[in-house]
Amino acid sequence: MCGIVGYVGPRDSQAILLAGLARLEYRGYDSAGIAVIDADGDLELRKRAGKLAVLRDDLQAHPMPDGTTGIGHTRWATHGGPTDANAHPHLADDDKLAVIHNGIVENYADLKAGLLSDGYTFLSETDTEVAAVLLGHEYRANGGDLEGAFRTTVSRLEGAFTLLALHEDHPGLVVGARRNSPLVIGLGEGENFLGSDVAAFVEHTRNALAIGQDQIVAITPAAVTVTDFDGDPVEVEPFEVTWDAAAAEKGGWSSFMAKEVSEEPEAVANTIRGRIRDGAVAIPELDGLDDLFRDITRIIVIAAGTAAYAGMVGKYALEQWARIPVDVELAHEFHYRDPVIGPNTLVVSISQSGETMDTLMAVKYAREKGARTLSICNTQGATIPRESDAIVYTHAGPEVAVASTKAFVAQITAQYLLALHIAAVRGTLPANEIADSLRELEAIPAKIQHILDTEQERIEQFAHWMADTRSVLFLGRHVGYPIALEGALKLKEISYIHAEGFAAGELKHGPIALIEPGQPVFVIVPSPREAALLHSKVISNIREIHARGARVIAVAEEGDAAVLPISDEVLHVPIAGPIFQALLTVVPLHIFAMGLATAKGLDVDQPRNLAKSVTVE
Ligand code: M6R
């Protein structure tokens, strides 16, 4: 939440900052602002409530002097509403100092009380302005040492924060700090960048440095220095960004979500690529973990939102293939309920962004309790993998739309690989069955592509007809259950329609009371050929709701004749084994949610009230 960008170098910074903010806008879009030190050495500020476009238009209509040192911010509001006054940057030290912030300063009220009693005044309701005023105070107190003042300031802040600051007395310098919130450095030629993630600067450089926890960075055009909060130098890890700027562009697509749904086949294929050798899983990141995989007695998967639903799907694979008990926990619930974990517990976190605060806190907590941690993550240099003992990256490429789609199928794919690898290590599945499953996994991208090629248009048309629907239910069994939850979440998130997902077997224990004539119900139908028993159970569930007048939309295997007489609409998927079917049945649901939101004229990429990276608890 909140996107941050910083630049120092020979070029005028406004265009660079605005382009960086455009790539970070998925992190929040309540307001946007930039501050630059202009050619005369004066600090210039412009900030506006609303999306980045409002700021852009304002700058176009009323140009502001440019300069070669600047910071920019796009906000997801926490303290104070989305107003011009609450927009970042915030100023201090007689408007010579500008500060931007991502996170929450938890002790801001105490700090503010102290500063008020010292005679300082505030223009906004934000915690960030408190940090800015405190920094200005420390700067005056130490005689103008910006880095020193920054160190003293961040040491007094509690909570989670990435802070960037610049001061007009120090052109060519941007300082930053991070605690539990992301910040990466982009290394250019005679210029350097800071960003909430690499998207902020990937069009200028793919050479990056990941800053660790509780570290401070100072960038000038010629140098980057990183220290801890005590001022001691620290080593930082260089990495090369594996994707280029074009991957984070919309291209010719109507939305990022449309582009990302179209990339679902590729997301699965890229997550598998190079990781299967001679019919076995070969993931270098897992080398050396065999003893751990043999010794563990339990796996707990922690995640939030769509990533948690991916975890629920993964549970079926891990338990069936690797024969280890698996619990899937919402990260925010796990952390605060004293769970029973220890050295024989493997805690697997799943996160597209690698920055979700709930998940990060749960990972840290699990480590403190002695558990081993493995992160499944899509974002290089992110915090969660850095805080984990092992990492398996998904290779879905940058996901920009707030609604997670291609990352979801990649997260499931990574878990299937992990489950088959652990099964091999523990000897719970014969080698030939592992090889068969891997072959089936490798066939999935083409099957997803087939759905996109043959069903997408029809599903979008169907979604269009349903644009006035007020409530939609989703039912599924086995892996179809988390897919039902995912279908419902996606619809709520981008179309603002009430939607609920249920385990189909749970229907008769209460939710069936919701069925009235015309109620649309999506039902995820297992394969009649690969999962005959499950299929017959779901067919019975469909009969129960059909008999009560529900409008049944079946997501079913091509050629499934049993669904036809009891469904009003059938969305087809190719044949796949019971576990693999999750990777197919979700695709029509993603298309449907996108189609319906589009039909309602909504912004599918930036739904109201949301941000992509949820970096507050
Ligand atoms: O970055 P993460 O995967 O950790 O994000 C977790 C959730 O916030 C995320 O999946 C959210 O539920 C999506 N917006 C759903 O589409």
Image (cartoon, rainbow, N blue to C red):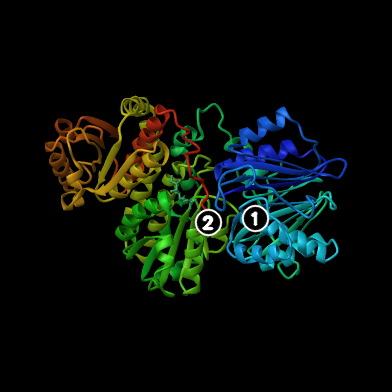
In the picture, measured across the screen, residue 583 lies left or right of residue 556, that is: right
The percent coordinates of residue 572 (x first, y second) are: 28, 32
In the picture, measured across the screen, residue 171 lies left or right of residue 294, that is: right
Circles 1 and 2: CB distance less than 8 Å? no
Q: Earlier in the sequence, mark 1 or mark 2?
A: 1
Q: Which picture quadrant has residue 141?
A: bottom right
Q: Please tell me whether mark 1 sits on a helix, a strand or a loop.
A: helix
Considering every residue shown, the one lying at the far left of the view is 547
Q: Please tell me whether mark 2 sits on a helix, a strand or a loop.
A: loop
The percent coordinates of residue 126 (x first, y second) are: 61, 53
The percent coordinates of residue 459 (x first, y second) are: 33, 28
Q: Nearer the viewer, residue 482 or 269?
A: 482
Q: Residue under circle 2?
A: 616
Q: Nearer the viewer, residue 414 or 588?
A: 588
Residue type at numbered disc 1: Thr
Q: In the rendered view, would you say 612 is above or below 14? A: below
